[in-house]
Image (cartoon, rainbow, N blue to C red):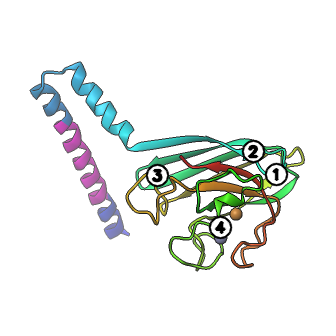
Amino acid sequence: MKKNFLMLATLGLITLTSCDKKEENVVVTDETVTVDETVVDETDGVVEEDVKTLDLTFSPASDSNLSGTATLTQNGEEVTLDVNLSGLTPGPHAIHIHEKGDCSAPDASSAGGHWNPTGEEHGKFNVEGFHMGDIGNLEADEDGNATLTFTTDKWCLDCDDESENLVGRSIIIHEGEDDFTTQPTGNAGGRIGCVVIE
Ligand SMILES: [Cu+2]
Ligand SMILES: [Zn+2]
């Protein structure tokens, strides 16, 4: 018990010490450069560059009434997808990243199959084999509205690794539910919404 406490205390001290050092550094920099608004602006710029955001608007497909938005945000190593939809039939609807950034076909078939840069089988994200685009299902309430928040460190926005890069793909909403087992689609039925990630 005593040993654990000592270890925690030591860790705390290290954390405090490193914080102190950072703060000292900042102060030293400010003093050296004679506190200047330009310097402050540059610091803000660097912090913002680390966060990338894409605001996207879904188009309906296959004569559906779907409307809604998707926001993709990269913060450090993680990408978060926020989806907000209405005009759905109540119940579960599959949502996937599909490989082609093309929503032009009336049934959104132009978006191709599930995005699968790693050559795996269709499945559940982060459970054994799965496509990189296998987000899963979202649930529409009795008014036909649905939201979803999904975060992973396996995607990126506009990075050099094409097995992680979402830009140039599309997000598809399906008529039915993903059963996570039928190959290679999850048996989710037609495509009722589509948006290109760009
Ligand atoms: Cu799909
Ligand atoms: Zn899949």
Indicate the secondary structure of the residue bearing disc 4.
loop
Circles 1, 4 touching at the beta carbon (< 8 Å): no
| Circle nearer the N terminus (1, 4) | 4
Residue at 46%, 66% (x, y): give it: 163
Instruction: Report the residue marked by disc 1.
Output: 140
Look at discs 2 and 1 and give the one toward the viewer.
2
* Depicted 34 relative to depicted 63: above or below: above
* Amino acid identity at mark 3: Leu
Instruction: Report the residue marked by disc 4.
Output: 113
Circles 2, 1 touching at the beta carbon (< 8 Å): yes
In the rendered image, residue 3, in percent from the top left (x then y), is placed at: 31, 69
Can you tell me whether the CB of the residue at mark 2 lies under 8 Å from the nearest atom of ligand 1? no
Look at discs 1 and 3 and give the one toward the viewer.
3
**Quadrant assignment for the N terminus:** bottom left
How far is the residue under mark 1 from the one under mark 3?
27 Å
Q: Quadrant of ligand 2?
A: bottom right
The mark found on residue 96 in the picture is none
* Amino acid identity at mark 1: Ala
In the rendered image, residue 192, in percent from the top left (x then y), is placed at: 78, 53
How far is the residue under mark 1 from the one under mark 4?
24 Å
